[in-house]
């Protein structure tokens, strides 16, 4: 396909460094065979569907009831944005992605799940857009941010240093999202340094962390900043 956008049907088409992810394609997108499209880079960052659905369920139930807008600041190929739209919890969902090809994949993938028109797609830099176009919206929104983790090398550290995470460290994410919006969920490496996350919790509040697991191992964690209900008890298991 043109512009670096692909739907790989057969293992022989898949670049070596992506094969590991392609073999898990039905875990990543249950509707893969309906024509899911990806760029080669998007495979590394995508949130697998069961994890995205679980997160969407948690955010839907634990977010302050008056908040009806969700902003996904790093939409990628749509893994999380699609799950948020499918939850039916939000009056408005904005999905921001700076890479035009990846954004094209996200819109296409959302159409496969029947939710493309439920999402406002914005191409551009989320840090700039949060300060301009979405400045007044941000106060009334829940922000979900799944930033790049600096490539697959993040697994090598026993404790992942969020302050030196590339290209955006935790302080950048805090200033850009938590300060203006308050109710923010960050999707981060499972080994993230909890002491660094705790620095941003106001006195008297608790640090809410959920690990999201697949096949008996944590895939990633989310930290919930702001006025979320207790994530564990907000949910009916
Ligand atoms: C880890 S991926 C997100 C994956 C997404 N949650 C999903 O499930 O498909 C991070 C994405 O953020 C995008 N990105 C990086 N910097 C950005 C920025 N400043 N503004 C908007 N998007 C950005 C990258 O192009 C990449 O697609």
Image (spheres, grey):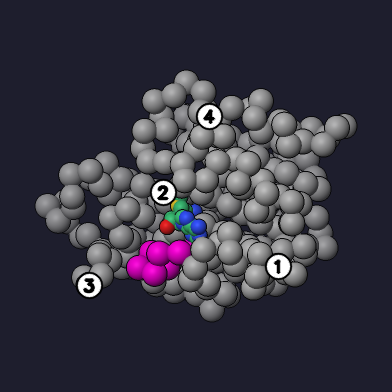
Mark 4 vs mark 3: in front? 4
Q: Is residue 148 left or right of residue 226?
A: left
Give the SS element for disc 3. helix
Q: What residue is pinned by disc 3?
A: 2
Q: Is residue 133 left or right of residue 1?
A: right
State the CA–CA distance, disc 4 to disc 3.
Answer: 37 Å
Give the SS element for disc 2. helix
- Residue shown at the point (51%, 28%) measured from the top left: 160
Q: What residue is pinned by disc 2?
A: 45
Highlighted magenta segment, given as a residue range: 97-103
Q: What residue is pinned by disc 4?
A: 161
Observer-nearest of 19 and 154: 154
N-terminal of the two: label 4 or label 2? 2
Q: Is residue 192 left or right of residue 76?
A: right
Whether label 4 lies within 8 Å of ligand 1 gets the answer no
N-terminal of the two: label 1 or label 3? 3
N-terminal of the two: label 1 or label 4? 1
């Amino acid at each position: 396909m043109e512009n670096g956008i692909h739907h790989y049907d057969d293992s022989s088409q898949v670049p070596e460094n992506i094969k590991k992810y392609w073999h898990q394609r039905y875990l990543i997108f249950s509707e893969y065979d309906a024509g899911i499209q990806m760029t080669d880079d998007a495979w590394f960052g995508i949130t697998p569907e069961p994890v995205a659905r679980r997160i969407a369920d948690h955010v839907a139930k634990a977010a302050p009831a008056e908040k009806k807008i969700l902003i996904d600041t790093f939409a990628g190929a749509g893994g999380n944005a699609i799950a948020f739209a499918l939850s039916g919890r939000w009056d408005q969902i904005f999905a921001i992605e700076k890479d035009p090809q990846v954004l094209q994949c996200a819109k296409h993938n959302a159409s496969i799940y029947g939710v493309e028109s439920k999402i406002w797609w914005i191409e551009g830099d989320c840090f700039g857009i949060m300060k301009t176009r979405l400045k007044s919206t941000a106060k009334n929104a829940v922000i979900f941010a799944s930033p790049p983790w600096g490539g697959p090398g993040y697994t090598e550290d026993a404790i992942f240093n969020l302050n030196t995470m590339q290209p955006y460290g935790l302080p950048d994410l805090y200033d850009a999202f938590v300060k203006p919006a308050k109710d923010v969920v960050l999707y981060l490496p499972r080994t993230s340094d909890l002491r660094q996350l705790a620095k941003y919790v106001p006195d008297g509040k608790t640090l809410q962390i959920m690990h999201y697991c697949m096949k008996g191992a944590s895939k990633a964690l989310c930290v919930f900043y702001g006025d979320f209900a207790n994530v564990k008890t907000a949910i009916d298991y």
